[in-house]
Image (cartoon, rainbow, N blue to C red):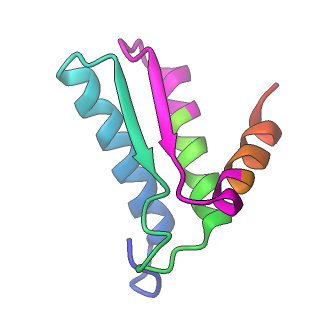
Amino acid sequence: PRMGEGDEDRKLRSATLSALELADKHRVESIAFPAISTGIFGYPKDKCAEVMLTAIIDYLKSKKTGLKKIILCLYDDETYRIFEETLKRKSP
């Protein structure tokens, strides 16, 4: 999603879930995600982490999946730290 177009959180969640569903449909065992739209499209990194990680966790809890590995390819230390802190908050 591009910031300013509206409904960005829903679009990002939908894109994340669609990718996970497509991976399962094709029976792949791993998938990699970048921090979607945080570069040129201006989506805030903290919101991206929250939306994407929530979508991934919800998917894993609600579906039987063949995915064994989900990789987050994060461009820089700041983005890594944000995703790491967000995941720690979401982990039991």
Where does residue 28 sit, x and y in percent of width and height? 26, 19
Q: Is residue 73 magenta?
A: yes
**Residue 81's x, y, as percent?**
74, 53
Furthest toward the bottom, the residue is 4
Q: Is residue 39 left or right of residue 66?
A: right
**Image point (30%, 40%), residue name:** 19
Q: Is residue 81 above or below residue 28?
A: below
Q: Nearer the viewer, residue 47 or 38?
A: 38
Give the residue furthest to the front. 76
Residue placed most toward the observer, 78 or 7: 78
- Residue 24, given in percent of the width and then of the height, sits at 27, 22
Extreme residue toward the left, this view: 26
The stretch drawn in magenta includes residue 61: yes
Q: Point out the stretch of residues depicted in magenta.
A: 57-80
Picture mark count? 0
Q: Residue at x 46, y 74 (%)?
A: 39
In the visual, does 73 lie left or right of 84? left
Q: Residue at x 50, y 80 (%)?
A: 42
Residue 51 sits above or below residue 26 on the image? below
Q: Position of residue 83 (x, y in %)?
A: 67, 49
Q: For this rendering, which residue is in front, 77 or 21?
A: 77
Q: What is the quadrant of the N terminus in the image?
A: bottom left
Q: Quadrant of residue 45?
A: bottom right
Q: Is residue 10 left or right of residue 49?
A: left
For the C terminus, the image quarter is: top right
Q: Nearer the viewer, residue 52 or 41?
A: 41
Q: Residue at x 30, y 42 (%)?
A: 18
